[in-house]
Amino acid sequence: MVETELYEPIRRWLEGQGYAVSAEVGFCDVVAYPPDDPQSLIVVELKRRMSLDLLAQAALRKELTDAVYVAVPLQGSRSRLRNGRALRTLLRRLETGLIVVRFLRGITRVEVLLHPLPFRHRTAHKRRGRIIREIDGRFAEFDKAGQPGSTPRLSAWRQRSLLVALILRECDSSSPADLRARGAPEQTQRILSLNSYGWFERLRHGVYGLSAAGRAALEILPEETGQLLSDSRLFKGPSER
């Protein structure tokens, strides 16, 4: 499919809304305007697929008018845009509209998924707070940016769970209070109760030991990571001061 196949459905749809339509005007793929108000331009950029080039073109067209749309094709009634939710979020921030031309059996359908409205920035205070608490709760930075998504992250909770497991391995079995006395983190009781990674097992009331999964997790723990976590017992993290 080429961009010219998108033009006719877009042209018919705009003319059906009462607009005069022109193509390839000053680098713009499609320009539409009310016949009685040529200053109220609408610009539509056409592409076979969503791309950075298309978004860059739309940003440049914002110099001409606030009413800028990007249009891409979809085949069939059930197809969806890849990463559609993230794409809409980005287009909202760019104050750019989104049109899909859906090619069905024998007909085409134009769908406006997003209009180019002014974007109102809002700070996600709760999510920002969670990030700050996560940073504050870590003993050290073990992860590297850009790791594959399948690689387990050493989050603050995982670090603290590993520290509990390391101390529990030393004493074989113990109560939460005794683990705390040996340098385990403040959340030890909750870590043992939730058992998020399956590393612990309750031996009897108030006494816990390491499960086979916990011993296996410590066996593959890098030596430097285990050493840093063990050393962390000598101080309290910021969230425990």
Image (spheres, rainbow, N blue to C red):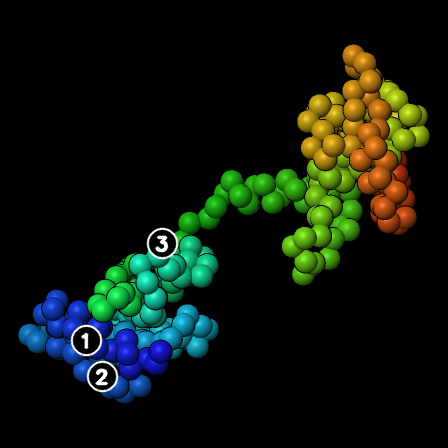
Q: Name the residue that disc number 1 marks.
A: 11
Q: Name the residue that disc number 2 marks.
A: 23
Q: Position of residue 161 (x, y in %)?
A: 76, 34
Which residue reaches farthest front?
105
Give the quarter of the figure containing the C terminus.
top right
Disc on the earlier residue, 1 or 2: 1
Disc 1 residue type (three-letter):
Arg
Q: Kindly indicate whether the residue at mark 2 contacts the one at mark 1 (C-beta within 8 angstroms).
A: yes
The image quadrant that residue 80 belongs to is: bottom left
Q: Nearer the viewer, mark 3 or mark 2?
A: 2
Q: Position of residue 55 (x, y in %)?
A: 41, 72
**Pick the front one: 6 or 178:** 6
Q: Position of residue 10 (x, y in %)?
A: 22, 72
Q: Residue at x 74, y 32 (%)?
A: 198
**Pick the front one: 179 or 136:** 179
Which residue reaches farthest left?
36
Specify the label residue 120 is tagged with. 3
